[in-house]
Image (spheres, coloured by chain):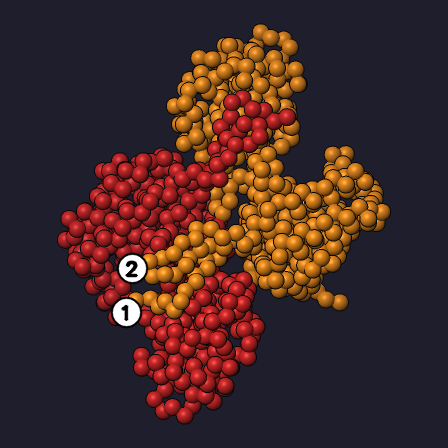
Chain colours: A red, B orange
Amino acid sequence: MKSPNKELEEKARAARAASRRMAYLPSEIKNKALHNIANDLLAGQEEILAANQLDYHQAQKSGMNAAMLDRLMLSPERLAAIAKDVLAVAELPDPVGEVFDMRTLPNGLQLSRKRVPLGVIGAIYESRPNVTVDISALCLKSGNAVILRGGREAVHSNSALAKVVREAATRAGVPEGAVQFIENTDRALVDEMLKLRQYIDLIIPRGGAGLIQHIKDNAAMPVIAGGVGVCHTYVDRSADVDKAVAIAFNAKVQRPTVCNALDTLLVHADIARKYLPLAAAELARAGVEMHCDERAMAILKEKPSLKLKPATDEDWGKEFLSLVAAVKVVDSLDEALEHIERCGSGHSEAIITGEDDAAVRFLDEVDAACVYVNASTRFTDGSQFGLGAEVGISTQKFHARGPLGVRELTSYKWIILGSGQVRP
Amino acid sequence: MKSPNKELEEKARAARAASRRMAYLPSEIKNKALHNIANDLLAGQEEILAANQLDYHQAQKSGMNAAMLDRLMLSPERLAAIAKDVLAVAELPDPVGEVFDMRTLPNGLQLSRKRVPLGVIGAIYESRPNVTVDISALCLKSGNAVILRGGREAVHSNSALAKVVREAATRAGVPEGAVQFIENTDRALVDEMLKLRQYIDLIIPRGGAGLIQHIKDNAAMPVIAGGVGVCHTYVDRSADVDKAVAIAFNAKVQRPTVCNALDTLLVHADIARKYLPLAAAELARAGVEMHCDERAMAILKEKPSLKLKPATDEDWGKEFLSLVAAVKVVDSLDEALEHIERCGSGHSEAIITGEDDAAVRFLDEVDAACVYVNASTRFTDGSQFGLGAEVGISTQKFHARGPLGVRELTSYKWIILGSGQVRP
């Protein structure tokens, strides 16, 4: 029997070899592969769901909590939704082959940049088996080979899904080896994978903060990870109060468990007495608990219908991922900017204002992936931004920032066409 | 006295603070700073050259070789050239603030990406003191703060140059702290610097392969390093022989010590008997030693004027950086592509051909930063490509590939302008 490391390296080498041909695979073949996958997910439903049942029952026996079990579970409806997402990826424009920055130099050389895949993407993820299909679809569309390494708890589901993806893609003419699945779920193998710089161009981790940090700290190759989102909405003194209430409510309540949801509401002192009671009443209606600084508390404390707590130092810069918001009154835009700089995570930040000067300063001075004027931070999303499906949302500045679509899984090469030019 | 680590961290923190304001500094101030630097380099010539003499004599006493001594030495002419390069950076368009991918979403949100600096750049370099000024100028232009850490052998020169840069920039209105210089040349301090992920966004190493590898292996933040250039020129069966001779000659001889110079000449068997004797005679005229495979040797061996050696396995994939070229006869474009895939370093590769099909296959299938048709690989250069001064040439695919100009020292932020939009 082969050693696990040997097998891993062989799969990585095969992915690398396939990636050479993936780089110039016609769009029609890639889209055909995606259509095949969507079809086969539905046609192979019985087998996939049986594999998922195995995982589910094992997880249940091992005492997995209900939220995690729900994430693990597949159903005919969920499979149909996954297939639909694959078809949506097929509909996206092919990012590969785009030629840009084209120009003719004075010596007659024709210079341009041509978009190419990154090469081989390593995906390391936990729990949700749909990631197996999602990441494969995004990698296929962007011309990248992919090495999938899912979590132990979903190994039967992932294996069944990867088999469908691999066979459907190969049938369309995608090079064999372009989709690799690692069945071995030993933790040690992840660390081996993170060393394979010569075969893997980029690692995409999907999962809890612990997994992501471990991968960032240990990968020998670049990593793109969805980051923590500590999101502020700042209600400026000139804000339209009704809009500011609706935006804060939407940012906090519409889906509180995600990274672009509101964490801290900052309110200018000049508008706080008018704004805060209205906003708080609305937030309380959805059951939001407010952790208030002294000044916000002084304004809100007489309302018995509110769920209020005094804010502590830990509340500033905390990602709540639940129906909790920190609330703070500030004396100026400067104080709001300073607070965001100190406590933000560079994800999504919003100002609600009627003053252009304040908007411009906020846009200039806030250093975050997405900076909003008079809108909800909940829009930070590849699909909302019109990029189609997303790999994640980057809070780093290198390579790509914010929602990561298929274009962000590419690089470029310089193409230089001459007629005998030499350098003088 | 402060501990070195404490001092390093304070400088890094000051650079981070300055970078916040650098991000939206008007172009006029940045360009004024660059003009001030160019002026002050000339005005402060005496002091700079005196500091350089200190370094030079110490290096001489310690037995530094002539080539290294020459790299270390400054003169009034060299200072004038450095000042001129700074003025050329001032002339470049400001990459920061560029707005792209602008569009209005169906819900009325106005979405765009705005180019912003990366933040804080750490430059770690050896020997040549001009790097202190070059990197500072490129960082200022691109709105980045910079932390400079030069080598021990040039510490007096670097310190004098950094002082000029810092004072000239501050006088123009650049935030204090934007240019930091680390005087402590302990090797251990480099490793401390590589850990400061919270303050430094990108490390640029400039120096020998050992330094670069050490930094790549140990940096907690992204690294952009100029890579090794193992460059092939492939003369296809349909090549124009005269042009192919001139291009190979230029690629090998015009400046043999640099990364974009020719290392291996691949020649199609159908044209080898006609091409190789002409190319070899021309290369021999410049003193080039040719390491030939058996078939090339069989064609060339009767000419006594040539410097020929049988090629060994080590010659394929070797960066010669001197007047040596490996020469190999191949039977097909496929064999050439396969050789380049196996032995290339992803830097610059060229095909000389008269056939469009061969050119297209070469452009598609060669995975390198710069791919040429009918031109010399010596053109791979930021200035030749019209990017202005360059930080280096990247052989990685992540973030930026090929010549790195000021735009490659930037990222972007998403700007979303609304009128009260919330997510349904």
- Are there few (<14), some (14-19), or many (20+) residues within 10 Å of tag 2? many
Q: Nearer the viewer, residue B181 or B99?
A: B99
Query: Residue A420, how many percent across, how many down?
Result: 54, 21
The answer to whether any part of residue B334 appears in the image is yes
Give the crowd class for mark 1: few <14, some 14-19, many >=20 residues within 10 Å: few
What residue is rendered at 56% in x and 33% in y? B380
Q: The residue marked by circle 2 belongs to what chain?
A: A
Tell which of B141 and A186 is nearer to you: B141
- Tell me where residue A290 appears, x and y as whole percent: 40, 81
**Res A128 label:** 2
Q: SS for tag 1?
A: helix
Chain of residue at mark 1: A
Residue behind mark 1: A67
Q: Nearer the viewer, residue A407 or B236?
A: A407
Give how far across and how far down residue B216 sits, in percent. Answer: 56, 48
Label placed on residue A102:
none
Q: With A57 as the anchor, is A12 left or right in this view?
A: right
Mark 1 residue type: Ala
Up-down: is A141 above or below A21?
A: below
| Residue type at tag 2 | Arg
Q: CA distance from mark 1 to mark 2?
A: 11 Å
